[in-house]
Amino acid sequence: MHRILWLFVSAVGAAAWGVIALRRGETINAAWLVLAAVGTYLVGYRFYSRFLARKVLGVDPSRATPAERINNGRDFVPTTRYVLFGHHFAAIAGAGPLVGPVLAMQFGWLPGTLWLVFGVVLGGAVQDFVILFGSMRRDGKSLGQMAKEEIGPLTGGLAMVAILAIMIILLAVLALVVVNALKDSPWGVFSILCTIPIALGMGFWMKVIRPGKTIEATVAGIVLLLAALVGGRYVAESPSLAPLFTHGGVTIAWGMMAYGFLASVLPVWMLLCPRDYLSTFMKIGTIVLLALGILWVRPDLQMPALTRFIDGTGPVFAGKLFPFAFITIACGAISGFHALVASGTTPKMIRRENDARLIGYGGMLTESFVAIMALCAAAALDPGIYFAINAPLGALGGTVENAVLRIREWGFVVTPEQLTGLAAMVGESSLLGRVGGAPSLAVGMAAIFSGVFGQHLMGLWYHFAIMFEALFILTTIDTGTRVGRFMLQELLGHVWSPLGRTSWYPSSLFAAFLIVAGWGWFLIQGVTDPLGGINSLWPLFGITNQLLAAVALCVGTTLIIKSGKVRYAWTTLVPLVGLLVVTLTAGWQKIFAADPRLGFLSHAREIAARIAAGSQDAGVGARLIFNDRMNAVLAAFFMATVVALVVASALEWLAVTRGRKPATTREALYVESAYAK
Amino acid sequence: MRNSGRLGTFLSLLKRVCGMPDYHGYLAHMREKHGDCAVLSEREYFEQHMQVRYGSGVSRCC
């Protein structure tokens, strides 16, 4: 019976891929993409993850997990697997899987779909599962600690520095996405600003008025949030209120930095915790809504399967299909950041060892599914509109008329009325050059929801989608700044021990300031970049995230080899090699490519030439050159760090396989599980 | 509000999925495993939960 079922699932998935392969040149329905993806996920889960669990990792259901052994009712709590699955998913899924596929749409929908589906089954989900399992066997140790213990202290130190650096780039690029969505948008700014008093009120309620009543506070918070969303329309339409909430990118960027700093040093109950609850509720609700919407509307994909921009001339970001499709889409296919979550709270809550498969591997498959839905929503947009929103203003020529001409040169048809009409429908003055992915995804989501509920609510849905993305990006910013602060304090503690005390206020303020200054510097650089910033920062973020994945896969390979399973080491080695090829190529091109749109150094040279010719303001030019050089140094630093990590790991692997070192790992001792009896 | 029956189960599930403190779950755990220990009040439990969850920074992904 089971065999027949799986035969059927495989057949449906294969048939959907067949339809996708044969219908080239015609428009295709999003339902085929969803079917093909889900079919592949199910087959991957059923067969590949079982192989990983049984043969490679040696999952042992009779072995007690740390949650069972330590069970302290606080962080170590045995948790039912479906609950923990939801918990883990809410922690790993954020803005990344929504934004990356939208940006990569400049190549067409096919490359993103293939990379998301096969990348996750063979790479991303494997990474998450292996790290989650490794951490679970070591009482919930972090990625950095595992790197230190299993590979060596130098490697552990390098991994920590790399993690801190990627945090800073990540926060900057996510903040940039929000700034681009909110600039000159009084509706958006008003509704996002309202989230701060709402969160403060919720925090006060849960802490002081009715301690611990989290559900009632959160439900009230969501109601107020929706009220703020509706109220935003009146603010935007009011001639006296609208100017108060209409701000340029630089002002919003400074506001976000001030917010990030305050949120990371204030007590958690004031902002962080209530915002975390709000954004988790909204995240789960909206993702379910989006899935239902796509299944209900089943839109046709307007975007071609492949565009002419696979040659690297695209306006959204520079670079060819290889390697940049694999860099632009990180989260959803493989995301190094997950290794931090998979070695954080989740491993301490697993009830039975065999649950790790559903939570680690299955959780990542679900994130990939979210990315596929974002991809469908973006591909359902008219390509002309997609490029009008996602190409930087500089490339579009500034005005609607120029943009229409420019987009026609790129081979897509759009009329000025379409662009102004759409902007009016969603309640914005203009959608041109709103780079960063969030606005075009919001338009796509609004179109899908309007297909279910009627066109007159389009503006509300657009701002709902913007608020939903901004809400959890801001949550990432305050949690991320706080985590960064703790990491920095730990590092600084080695220099002067009082700086390492997280309870000492001056040290906390100092470290928080440094972290905010770090991401704020990149944020301002992105906001003032004439090409929109996403152009240079998103690839840098993709490269760092994938390099972190390479670190995680190095640790994973080490764990597998040291547990005496060299013959199965290919399961992590193959994705590791793939990632290294992609990221090192992309990093090299970002630094050294001769095309000034792509290479940091050649861009700096071009600016220098323009200053010499008198066509570029010297002060601004000098700053642009400094930014380029800084980005180049940073990319080189990441690449060097990862190469060093890989070499150190490879030496360790050789030492074990040659028999110079015993194949033993530092797992916690075996205790029989009471659940197994 | 007494959380009992199906609504209580649902709320408890929701809380645990969203990483919220589940006081009723905690009370049940204490009754079952450490019947002789004193239990925390709801306020104490909430504060302890926040300390554990956010004290050393919670990782939220991109």
Image (tube, coloured by chain):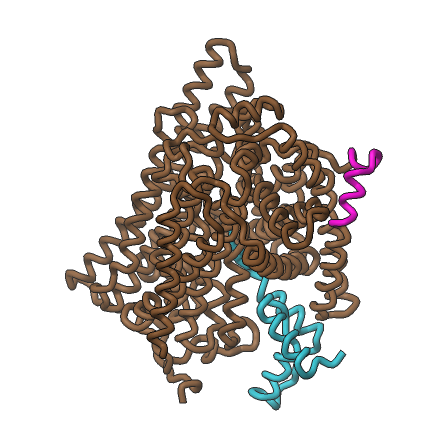
Chain colours: A brown, B cyan
| Residue in view at x 47 percent, y 9 percent | A613
Relative depth, front residue between A200 and A385: A385
Q: Hey, which residue is sitting farthest left in the picture?
A: A658
Relative to B52, is A553 above or below? above
Relative to A181, is A606 above or below? above
Relative depth, front residue between A461 and A520: A461
Residue A16 shown left or right of residue A170 in the figure: left
Would you say residue A245 sits in the magenta stretch? no
So how many labels did they put on this image? Answer: 0
- The image shows residue A304 at horizontal and vertical percentages of 44, 40
- The image shows residue A631 at horizontal and vertical percentages of 44, 33
Task: Give the residues in magenta.
Answer: A229-243
- The image shows residue A619 at horizontal and vertical percentages of 55, 18
Relative to A72, is A247 above or below? above
Instruction: Identify the main secondary structure in magenta.
Output: helix
Where is residue A568, by image quadrant? Answer: bottom left
